[in-house]
Amino acid sequence: MIKNRKELIEFEKRLLNAKKKLLKQRNYTNSMLLNQQGESSGELSAYRTHVADIGSQTYQKEISSQLSSYESGILMQIDEALKRIRENCYGDCIKCSKSISKARLRVLPYTQICVKCTKEKTASKKNI
């Protein structure tokens, strides 16, 4: 756990800035999805759409949808990290309860798992 109030404020600012940027990005991604849906429904053109164009549109729509889903997941992690700051447990690994290194938190301020537990989780996924 990070006990230094000044450091907690720094991490909180980082998280809030990351959230602000991600919300802006997600709004853009969602607007692209809505635009692609309009194009694929034929609203923007009186011409017939070629099969290859439909495939490209479907691919772009899928990528945008996956990106939106990823962004939503990161936003949830950021909100959870902000909650952990309020509850005075920010910086503790949720798996082993040991402190997450400050260097790791600076890179991934919304992480909830220490490096050791992340490696163990990754190794167990490889064995499946």
Image (cartoon, rainbow, N blue to C red):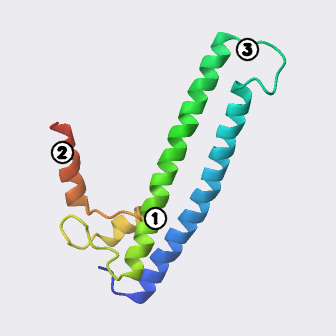
Answer with left or right where residue 35 lies relative to residue 11: right
Asked which quadrant contains residue 37, the reply is top right
> Which is more toward the observer, 14 or 75?
75
**Amino acid type indicated by mark 1:** Ile
Vertical order, 125 against 91 (above or below) = above
Q: Give the residue drawn at x 32%, y 64%.
A: 112
Q: Give the residue drawn at x 51%, y 51%.
A: 71
Asked which quadrant contains residue 54, the reply is top right
Label 2: which residue?
A: 123
How far, Cα to Cα, is label 3 from label 2?
A: 47 Å
Mark closer to the chain start, 1 or 2: 1
Q: Where residue 49 is drawn, which disc sits there?
A: 3
Badge 3 marks a residue whose secondary structure is: loop
Mark closer to the chain start, 3 or 2: 3
**Amino acid type indicated by mark 2:** Ala
Badge 2 marks a residue whose secondary structure is: helix
Badge 1 marks a residue whose secondary structure is: helix
Label 1: which residue?
A: 78
